[in-house]
Amino acid sequence: MQLSSFGRKFCQASGTLKLMDDLGEAFSSEREMINLGGGNPSHIASIEALFRARLGVLAQRPGELERVVGEYGGPGGDGAFAESLSRLLRAELGWDVGPRNVCVTNGSQSAFFGLFNLLAGPCDDGINRKIMLPMAPEYIGYADVGIAPELFVSRRPMIDFLEDKLFKYRVDFTGLSVGSDIGAICVSRPTNPTGNVLTDDEVSALRELAREADVPLILDDAYGAPFPNIIFGDVNPVWDEDMILCMSLSKLGLPGIRTGIVVASEEVVRALSAVNAILSLAPGSMGPALAIDLIESGEILRISREVIEPHYRDRAARATDLLREELCDYDVFVHKPEGAIFVWLWCRGLPVTNAVLYERLKERGVVVVSGEYFFPGLEEDDWIHKRECLRLTYADDPEKVERGLRIVAEEVRRAYGADAS
Ligand code: PLP
């Protein structure tokens, strides 16, 4: 088969594909594996019961299920859903947003494909624009979505050492400028893989930089406010028409129905709807149909605040405490858990690479994600830090997670005691 340049780029050994293949292979074996690797949210019984009940209501309302599954929606998604969501955002957060500022996509991953390729790559003015990630580590899912090669530029963060073997990344604004070759700035808040939450000051500074350069600031809100609200401190959710906010129903517990929601200027919503129309005619309708009543009643905010956030906060604290206790005698640090569903472990001066550690852990039945995948735009940088970190998710069954983390700690101790062969 003769592949096009696009075909070759998408079929090459991309980080995302390798990761998904690897996870698939690990879990298809007979052996019981402990999953500290993937990005699945927890199965939270009360949330699942809520969605089951919503499905029942949907099925019983005359004509509703037939409309949802039996008809294509518009390319930007269901108008009633956009109306409800914008009403909630206006009332709850005071944003000046209306239904025309909302576009539904088949997962926020698809939104990123659309947005990044709309805003970066070769442009008619002859400039080959890039997406600026103000700091890496950043979400692996961005890395390969560019149709044009090398779509990202990013920078190393500053590292603050905190008490109790915690650390926190901060955006290094020194010398950070946004030139005419930048099409947009993008950050995830909370960040996958680190659990970092950018401070309000960092977000303000990035908004200012974006405004000065006349490019949008894309804020990836997959874990953020107002839902699923997996943020453990107080931060101020912001939006205006210069920003593109990418929300998702996945971490609420619905990753299988692939629903992303973009809140942006009408111009961006129109452009993204055009991408939707070409790629998939229309986004799926099931996610909005399941969520709309919860949005109308405000129940989506209550479950996010009272169920989802405390659930992950507790899991994060347990995982962090266990790792710090097990590894207190080593030069190992945990990123301050501020949100999302991961712990980010930094084993400073580790005598083996995280790739070796990953293989050893797989042999012991524990799947993790090796940190070097999470530096899109920094591929050429041989920063040793990239090979010293691991991403571990604590979303799975707590007993299994604990067992898995203890094995991780054992292997880290062994690696420090072993030679770098
Ligand atoms: N953004 C971040 C930071 C994520 O972690 C994920 C998934 O794990 C996504 C976006 C994509 O989410 P989805 O396509 O399921 O909406």
Image (cartoon, grey):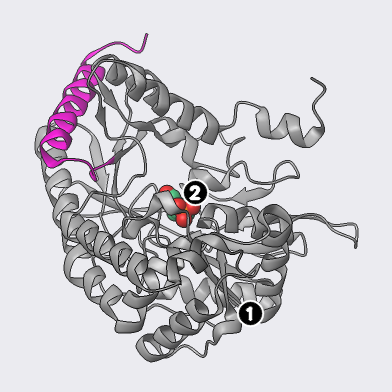
Indicate the secondary structure of the residue bearing disc 2: loop
The mark found on residue 265 in the picture is 1
In percent of width and height, residue 202 lies at: 45, 70
Amino acid type, label 1 = Ser
Q: Residue at x 18, y 30 (%)?
A: 404
Which quarter of the image is occupied by the N terminus? Answer: top right
The mark found on residue 136 in the picture is 2
Q: Which residues are magenta?
A: 393-421
Amino acid type, label 2 = Ala
Q: Main secondary structure of the magenta part?
A: helix
Q: Residue at x 30, y 67 (%)?
A: 229
Circle 1 residues within 10 Å: few <14, some 14–19, many ≥20: many
Give the side of residue 296 with respect to residue 133, left or right.
Answer: left
- Quarter of the rendering containing residue 292: bottom left
Residue 230 in view, yes or no: no
Is residue 401 in the magenta section? yes
Question: In this view of the protein, which residue sits in the foreground, 235 or 79?
Answer: 79
Question: In this view of the protein, which residue sits in the foreground, 146 or 57?
Answer: 57
Q: Residue at x 28, y 20 (%)?
A: 361
Question: In this view of the protein, which residue sits in the foreground, 19 or 46?
Answer: 46
Indicate the secondary structure of the residue bearing disc 1: loop
